[in-house]
């Protein structure tokens, strides 16, 4: 798009792709206002933007695709629940429209909204042990499958071909530069010697986040789920980094935390700060990824919802705002493509940096302590 | 705020799925690729190094060649100069020898001429003596009437005889 000449064709391809994405998102989200099931007369009904947005970025027991007229079109997903009466396994279509099935129903109370609950003996709503394949879980499975297939295709190429005499083709050519960039420029630079032990994890994290981010931008079925914008997902990824940072480190790292090289009266304060730091680092990773992706999804939804809000205000305003929304939606989708990559990159880079910092080298530490002692004098 | 709280079911699946994905990719995926990339980088680095070395070697060889050419040229010059010297010395030697020979021949000739002259003088002297005896005979036979005229004649004869001898010596 930016370059001219040889890349022009791809530039047009990108524009067309973004247009298609934007158009598809308009159609997909257009149906969203009716998704709460209570909407019957669209003309009288206020567009509930909050409902649209939270309905999309949250999790659900079915994968809602669209509504045609009054008919909901959604993919029912398996509900797997262990309640007080034992294991239950059925399709979520049984729970549609607040129906109760085997003592279970989808709560509409403040505390457990949208979750499967049952009534206990005292008549209170309690959540059973719930490992249902929800929309996010299914999206996670699909995206993971795509990721595994792509990466295995790539590694298969390297197994079957002699990389020393052939340039990579196909999937390998697509992934090689990205893998090389992450591996050499991010992981190797941040961790230093001994980086090879960590690179499979960090590469997995990078591509895992990237593929989930990208699939989240696709507005129709296999994509569109807000996976990386879900705090559970980022929590697990951050815990992974936390474990890797703190459990593969050496004694110098722990010495720096519990007996830092500072005057004695500063030690208690610094120890507390250091211990906080151990937890805030992965916490920041978790929140950054979650907030960025969720905000991106929300923003695109807001822009699209604007069409339906302004449609009530008359043809002129509605029409103008539609054009504005579509243009802005295209812009946001392009931006999200960028953000999808940047957030995956940032997560990987910071993880690598944290791991690198935790692997304090004795020489470096000695040098630092010499500097410190000379400063004190 | 369910949005900010991890959900147990999703957590379960996420841990499971991520663990499986990580296990598969860490075993069969990324190490293969990164190792290959590393190998290829090493290969490229190696090739570049070898090429650089070969380049340096070629440069060295070129220098060597230039040096050898210069040396050969110098040698040629030296040989030519030597040849010229030899030629010059031969010529001058020959000239000196020729001079010597010529001088020797001339000396020989001089000695021989001297000897010839000696013998010729001796001949002349004997001839003169003979002639003077003959002249004396004739004078004696002619008019030796008066003393005075006799003596005049003798002196005159003697002058005549000695004058050419004096001139000759």
Image: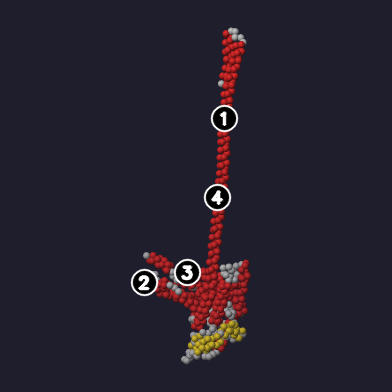
How far separated are the C-alphas under marks 2 and 3? 35 Å
In the displayed structure image, the side of residue A315 where residue A365 appears, left or right? left
How far separated are the C-alphas under marks 1 and 2? 129 Å
User: B53 and A152: which one is in front?
Assistant: B53
Q: Nearer the viewer, mark 2 or mark 4?
A: 4
Determine which of the numbered discs, if any, sits on residue B71 in the image: 4
Q: Dot 4, how many residues are within 10 Å of its Cα: few (below 14), some (14-19), or many (20+)?
A: few
Determine which of the numbered discs, if any, sits on residue A303 in the image: none
The residue that disc 2 covers is A265
User: B100 and A272: which one is in front?
Assistant: B100
Q: Is residue A364 visible?
A: yes
Callout 2–callout 3 Cβ contact below 8 Å: no
- Specify which label sits upstream in the sequence, 4 or 1: 4
- Specify which label sits upstream in the sequence, 2 or 3: 3
Q: Nearer the viewer, mark 3 or mark 4?
A: 4
How far separated are the C-alphas under marks 1 and 3? 107 Å
The residue that disc 3 covers is A193
Q: Is residue A317 visible?
A: no
Q: Dot 2, how many residues are within 10 Å of its Cα: few (below 14), some (14-19), or many (20+)?
A: few
The residue that disc 1 covers is B108
In the displayed structure image, the side of residue A168 where residue A281 appears, left or right? left
- Label 1: element kind: helix
Which quadrant of the view contains residue A251? bottom left
How far separated are the C-alphas under marks 4 and 1? 55 Å
- Label 4: element kind: helix
Structure colour scheme: secondary structure
Q: Chain of mark 4?
A: B
Residue A370 pos. (x, y %): 40, 66
Q: Nearer the viewer, mark 1 or mark 2?
A: 1
Which quadrant of the view contains residue A1? bottom right
């Amino acid at each position: 798009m930016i370059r001219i000449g040889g890349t022009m064709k791809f530039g047009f391809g990108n524009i067309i792709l973004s247009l298609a994405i934007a158009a598809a998102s308009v159609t997909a989200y257009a149906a969203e206002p009716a998704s709460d099931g209570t909407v019957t007369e669209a003309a009288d009904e206020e567009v509930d933007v909050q409902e649209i947005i939270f309905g999309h970025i949250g999790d659900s027991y079915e994968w809602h695709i669209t509504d045609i007229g009054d008919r909901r079109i959604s993919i029912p997903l398996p509900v797997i629940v262990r309640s007080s009466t034992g294991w239950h396994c059925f399709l979520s279509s049984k729970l549609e429209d607040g129906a109760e099935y085997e003592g279970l129903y989808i709560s509409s109370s403040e505390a457990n909204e949208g979750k499967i609950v049952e009534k206990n003996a005292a008549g209170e709503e309690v959540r059973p042990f719930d490992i249902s394949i929800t929309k996010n879980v299914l999206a996670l499975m699909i995206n993971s499958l795509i990721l595994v297939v792509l990466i295995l295709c790539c590694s298969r190429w390297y197994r079957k071909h002699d990389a020393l005499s052939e340039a990579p083709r196909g999937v390998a050519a697509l992934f090689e530069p990205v893998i090389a960039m992450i591996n050499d420029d991010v992981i190797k630079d941040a961790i230093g010697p001994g980086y090879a032990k960590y690179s499979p994890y960090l590469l997995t994290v990078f591509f895992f986040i990237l593929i989930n981010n990208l699939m989240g931008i696709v507005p129709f079925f296999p994509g569109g789920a807000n996976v990386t914008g879900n705090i559970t997902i980022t929590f697990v990824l951050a815990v992974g980094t936390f474990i890797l940072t703190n459990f593969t480190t050496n004694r110098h790292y722990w010495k720096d935390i519990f007996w830092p090289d500072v005057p004695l009266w500063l030690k208690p304060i610094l120890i507390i700060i250091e211990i906080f730091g151990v937890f805030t680092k992965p916490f920041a990773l978790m929140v950054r990824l979650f907030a960025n992706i969720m905000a991106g999804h929300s923003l695109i939804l807001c822009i699209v919802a604007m069409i339906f809000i302004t449609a009530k205000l008359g043809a002129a305003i509605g029409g103008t705002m539609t054009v504005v929304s579509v243009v802005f939606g295209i812009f946001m989708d392009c931006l999200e493509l960028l953000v999808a990559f940047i957030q995956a990159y940032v997560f990987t880079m910071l993880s690598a940096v944290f791991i690198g910092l935790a692997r304090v080298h004795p020489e470096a530490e000695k040098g630092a302590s010499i500097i410190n002692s000379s400063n004190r004098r | 705020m369910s949005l900010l709280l991890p959900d147990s079911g999703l957590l379960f699946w996420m841990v499971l799925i991520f663990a499986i994905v990580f296990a598969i990719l860490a075993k069969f995926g990324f190490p293969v690729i990164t190792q290959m990339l590393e190998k290829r980088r090493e290969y490229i680095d190696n090739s570049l190094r070898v090429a650089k070395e070969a380049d340096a070697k070629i440069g060295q060889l070129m220098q060597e060649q230039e040096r050898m050419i210069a040396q050969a040229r110098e040698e040629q010059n030296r040989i030519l100069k030597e040849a010229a010297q030899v030629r010059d010395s031969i010529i001058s030697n020959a000239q000196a020898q020729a001079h010597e020979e010529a001088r020797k021949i001339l000396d020989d000739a001089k000695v021989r001429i001297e000897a010839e002259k000696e013998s010729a003088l001796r001949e002349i002297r004997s001839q003169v003596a003979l002639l003077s005896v003959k002249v004396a005979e004739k004078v004696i036979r002619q008019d030796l009437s008066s003393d005075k005229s006799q003596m005049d004649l003798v002196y005159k004869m003697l002058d005549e005889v000695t004058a050419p001898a004096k001139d000759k010596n």
